[in-house]
Amino acid sequence: MQDLKTHITEYAGQCGFDLVRITGANAFAEERDAALARIQAGQMDGLPWFTESRVRRGADPEALLPGARSIICLGLSYLGPGSEEPPEPGRGKIARYARVKDYHRVMKRRMKAFVRGLEEHLGETVAARWYVDDGPMLDRAAAARSGLGWFGKSTNILTPSHGSWVLLGQVITDLELMPDAPSKKTCGACVRCIDDCPTGAIVAPYVVDNARCISYQTIENRGVIPVEMRPLIGDWIFGCDICQDVCPVNRRSKLPQLPIPPADAVGAAGEVDLEEILSLTEEEFRNRFQGTSVMRAKRVGLQKNACVALGNAGNRSAAPALERAMETGEPMVRGHAAWALGKIAGPKAKAVLDQSLTTEDDPYVRGEIEAALREFVL
Ligand code: B12
Ligand code: SF4
Ligand code: SF4
């Protein structure tokens, strides 16, 4: 049993994973109850697919793989060379995990190769299912129980070697393997992430209120970004890394041994030109971001976020780009562009809003234009 475990650990490294630990396939009862309580408290609102039945299924490895005995927990760092300096004016920020190619594909490919290699080593078929992010499993719960890392108060899993900059995957298998012990490390008295989260989304240690998280608003929210949240989003246009950037555990994180290839469309610094984003056609958006995590936000979502970031930057030179968005964008983009025009102010912005009100017939967008125009009389 120990020999096989040693082989698995070494082989996972050869397959390109930075971290590997084992836990048993018993149910995640406490974490299931914590997740169910989170749903009931409305703190997962906005994610209709995150249902109670999904949590129950995902917390029970036997339900996912009958005969499951062990879970091989894998971690892959996505830390790159990009600096965390504030971007140049007119540019928006993309979270670190999206500065590399879509990790779902890369990790699943590596996990499949890992399982096939194990089968070759053992000379028999191994019953296995693998998950990363989009499966029902509670990825962090498995990582924590295996000792791959510990739950930070930001809810991110922190690892001693690679900080929280790791993506998490699991291979559930019928192999009997010696489980590792959970980590004894904790955040101690630190509360940096709670204090520095701009939206107050970490409502208590280990509890993130989904709808208040910039990551949710800029990636998952298909509708209107709440007006009161917009100024707090700053220059983030896809995801948010603040609770990780401020975390002291992340200060000396190791780089990945076999990095996920970079997403050239995003760049190592994760900075993109906001006016350029606003002008992309559907085809141009696809050509540029295909194969990256940014696709998740869709073009309309990214453009909506670009409007918010332009409004927050408050640079009047953005008025012509916002005007074009008012003329050609989808209602969701027009609405957020109107808000941005109200924020950047100036005679050009006012003229665009006045003109738009004469032609706009979408009631939601009209409401945004009227609210933006009220900014000028204050
Ligand atoms: C839904 C989701 C989101 C939502 C909701 C986030 C959330 N906190 O739930 C949104 C869109 C906001 C989001 C954002 C991000 N996400 Co996300 N997300 C998920 C997803 C799909 C499910 C998470 C989940 O189950 N939430 C439910 C709640 C209940 O779980 P939880 O927050 O982990 O809570 C646990 C703890 O609170 C613990 N607990 C409760 N009480 C106590 C008490 C103590 C003392 C302790 C120790 C623990 C503890 O039990 C709970 C249940 O396990 C997972 C993938 C997956 N399938 O698991 C990725 C995942 C969690 N996300 C990931 C990432 C990278 C991010 C972002 C960093 C992306 C970004 N840069 O924008 C941010 C981080 C924001 C944050 N602070 O969490 C990674 C995290 C990797 C890591 N090292 O932790 C995951 C694991 C994807 C992956 N496979 O790599 N995400
Ligand atoms: S990702 Fe950003 S908004 Fe979400 S909890 Fe962390 S700091 Fe707050
Ligand atoms: S910032 Fe502090 S409290 Fe938050 S996750 Fe990091 S160590 Fe824990």
Image (cartoon, rainbow, N blue to C red):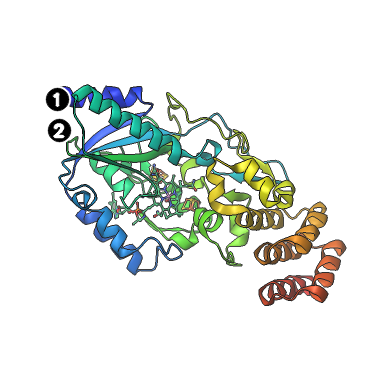
Element type at marker 1?
helix
Above or below, 102 against 205 in this view is above
Q: For the residue labelled by badge 2, is the local secondary structure a helix, a strand or a loop? A: loop
Q: Quadrant of residue 336?
A: bottom right
- The reply to whether residue 345 is visible in this rendering is yes
- At label 2, the amino acid type is Met
> Looking at the rendering, in which quadrant would you find the C terminus?
bottom right
x then y, percent, for residue 338: 73, 66
Residue at the image point whose x is 61% and y is 35% from the top? 269
Whole-percent x and y of residue 315? Answer: 77, 53
Amino acid at the residue labelled 1: Gln
Q: At 73% from the left edge and 46% from the top edge, which residue is drawn?
A: 276
Q: Which residue is mark 1?
A: 2
Q: Residue at x 21, y 32 (%)?
A: 125
Q: Report the side of 245 relative to 63 (left or right).
A: right
| Among the 4 quarters of the image, the one containing residue 273 | top right
The answer to whether marks 2 and 1 mark residues whose Cβ atoms lie closer than 8 Å is: yes
Query: CA gap, disc 2 to disc 1?
Result: 7 Å
- Left or right: where does residue 288 sit relative to residue 109? right
Residue 291, quarter of picture: top right
| Residue denoted by label 2 | 178
